[in-house]
């Protein structure tokens, strides 16, 4: 059984994360739209129940599947432009409350999962046949959990540690984003304009997965990871030239992302402009490093000195790029023009000096045929609505589901700290509650 990671979201605004493990290949945008059977289950403990069970039960269907724009299903439908949505697995749209024979103390997510699935099996409901995503919602009063949400990355499970009577889209959308195989999106400070020497410092603010909130939508690398860009929308650049980009989340056809080779990594370039429910606080051309083809683990390239984001009231285009280079791979990018819903971007793959940018003929570009995160994942199952999210494998029928999840690697969100990975038994542990920022320097030899 492949192991997926776990992603956590705390009530506090900062992000700490480490995404580990293989990320299976995703669907292709030209495939039929996916409807994923999702089952929210309200669970209680022997020593802890919902304070307002009627309100929780009443609000759950609307929170997950309602017609309003901020329901989970509506959000993912708009984000994918109709290519992916969440549908109720049962007519009632949820199950519960179900009392689990366990104490709330200890925040044992593996045991919660195991007992919830056992309770569902007694009702004749099995994972993979009757439901494909399981979302366990439980009262937070006595659990001691340090997070408001937890999810497999990728995978079919989310845990919602509920404060009050309903969870917001910021938590639900973020955790279901982890199910898609998206990690926490960070920010790489490359203040000299050269990507050879950058420092990871903070979060991107360009994605729901990078502290940007639901209104940020997600970035181009994450859309590629999900398979939500068609062949004509995400193109692999095979030669130097000038490309025209339309807004990432806008309506209509056209190129939305450039996928550029950069040594062992990829460089993805997008244009952001207000469209629908997204990007009202984001404008301009942005670029992301994709480490070794893992599109779910991209990091925003920031060339500014001050780490300016919407979070500190900076202008919408404060961290947009105008020109960048990677001397190690001889890649350079410059923005010819940007605004009013489109941008023109010059790309060089041969070390060309783009300090003076001129228009050039459109080059030939090769569409990405698979939109996968890595060639090593080509054999994984597609996201076709019949397998766990992202193609993650299910445990065998006689496997101990709780124990399997307890052994997973963790990716956490919480507090105002940055990431501090520590090797531990082949996994990694993220330190939380640390004041300040740990700078992770990535150097490459030119």
Image (spheres, helix red, strand yellow):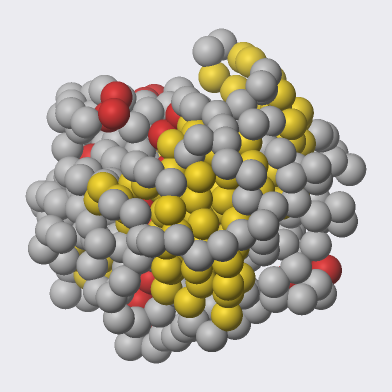
Is residue 411 placed above or below 318 in the rendered structure? above
Picture coordinates of residue 230 (x, y %)? 24, 60
The residue under the point 64% across, 31% down is 327
> Seen in the image, is 199 located left or right of residue 247?
right
Work out whether 30 lies above or below 384.
Answer: below
Residue at position x 70%, y 75% in the image: 316
Left or right position of 13 against 33: right
The quarter of the picture where the N terminus appears is: top left
Identify whether 66 is placed above or below 343. Answer: below
| Quarter occupied by residue 351 | top right
Query: x%, y% of residue 254?
Result: 31, 71
Vertical placement of 136 versus 420: above or below? below
Q: Which of 335 and 134 is in front in this view?
A: 335
Can you name the residue that lies furthest to the bottom here?
Answer: 68
Rendering coords of residue 110 (x, y %): 44, 35
**Callout count:** 0
Q: Nearer the viewer, residue 377 or 198?
A: 198
Residue 41: image quadrant is bottom left
User: Does residue 363 appear anywhere in the picture?
Assistant: yes
Residue at screen point 15% across, 60% down: 30
Name the image quarter holding the C terminus. top right
Q: Examine the rendering and report whether any part of residue 144 can be seen.
A: no
Who is closer to the viewer here, 325 or 115? Answer: 325
Query: Where residue 268 appears, x then y in whole percent?
Result: 48, 49
Q: Which residue is drawn at 89% across and 43% down?
A: 436
């Amino acid at each position: 059984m492949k192991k997926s990671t776990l992603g956590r979201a705390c009530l506090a605004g900062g992000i700490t994360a480490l995404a580990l493990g293989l990320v299976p290949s995703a669907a292709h945008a030209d495939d039929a739209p996916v409807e994923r059977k999702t089952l929210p289950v309200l669970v209680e403990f022997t020593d802890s129940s919902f304070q307002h069970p009627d309100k929780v039960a009443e609000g759950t269907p609307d929170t997950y599947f309602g017609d309003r724009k901020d329901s989970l299903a509506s959000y993912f439908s708009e984000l994918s432009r109709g290519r992916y949505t969440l549908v109720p697995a049962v007519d009632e749209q949820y199950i519960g409350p179900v009392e689990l024979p366990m104490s709330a103390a200890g925040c044992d997510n593996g045991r919660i999962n195991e007992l919830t699935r056992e309770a569902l099996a007694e009702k004749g409901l099995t994972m993979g046949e009757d439901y494909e995503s399981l979302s366990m919602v439980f009262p937070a009063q006595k659990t001691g959990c340090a997070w408001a949400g937890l999810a497999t990355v990728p995978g079919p499970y989310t845990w919602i540690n509920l404060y009050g009577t309903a969870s917001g889209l910021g938590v639900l959308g973020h955790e279901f984003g982890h199910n898609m195989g998206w990690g926490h999106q960070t920010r790489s400070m490359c203040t000299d304009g050269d990507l050879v020497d950058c420092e990871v410092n903070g979060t991107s603010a360009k994605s729901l997965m990078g502290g940007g909130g639901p209104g940020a939508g997600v970035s181009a690398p994450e859309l590629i990871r999900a398979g939500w860009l068609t062949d004509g929308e995400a193109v692999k650049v095979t030669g130097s030239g000038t490309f025209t980009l339309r807004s990432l989340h806008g309506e209509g056809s056209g190129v939305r992302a450039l996928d550029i080779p950069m040594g062992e990594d990829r460089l993805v370039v997008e244009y952001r402009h207000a469209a629908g429910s997204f990007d009202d606080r984001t404008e301009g051309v942005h670029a992301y490093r994709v480490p070794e083809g893992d599109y779910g683990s991209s990091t925003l390239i920031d060339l500014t000195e001050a780490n300016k984001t919407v979070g500190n009231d900076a202008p919408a285009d404060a961290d947009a790029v105008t020109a960048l280079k990677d001397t190690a791979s001889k890649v350079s990018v410059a923005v010819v023009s940007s605004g009013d819903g489109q941008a023109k971007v010059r790309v060089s793959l041969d070390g060309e000096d783009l300090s003076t940018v001129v228009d050039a003929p459109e080059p030939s570009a090769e569409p990405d045929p698979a939109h996968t995160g890595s060639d090593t994942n080509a054999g994984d199952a597609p996201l076709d609505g019949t397998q766990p999210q992202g193609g993650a494998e299910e445990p065998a029928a006689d496997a101990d589901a709780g124990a399997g999840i307890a052994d997973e690697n963790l990716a956490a969100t919480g507090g105002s700290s940055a990431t501090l990975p520590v090797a531990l038994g082949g996994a990694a542990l993220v330190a939380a509650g640390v004041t300040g920022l740990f700078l992770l320097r990535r150097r490459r030899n030119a």
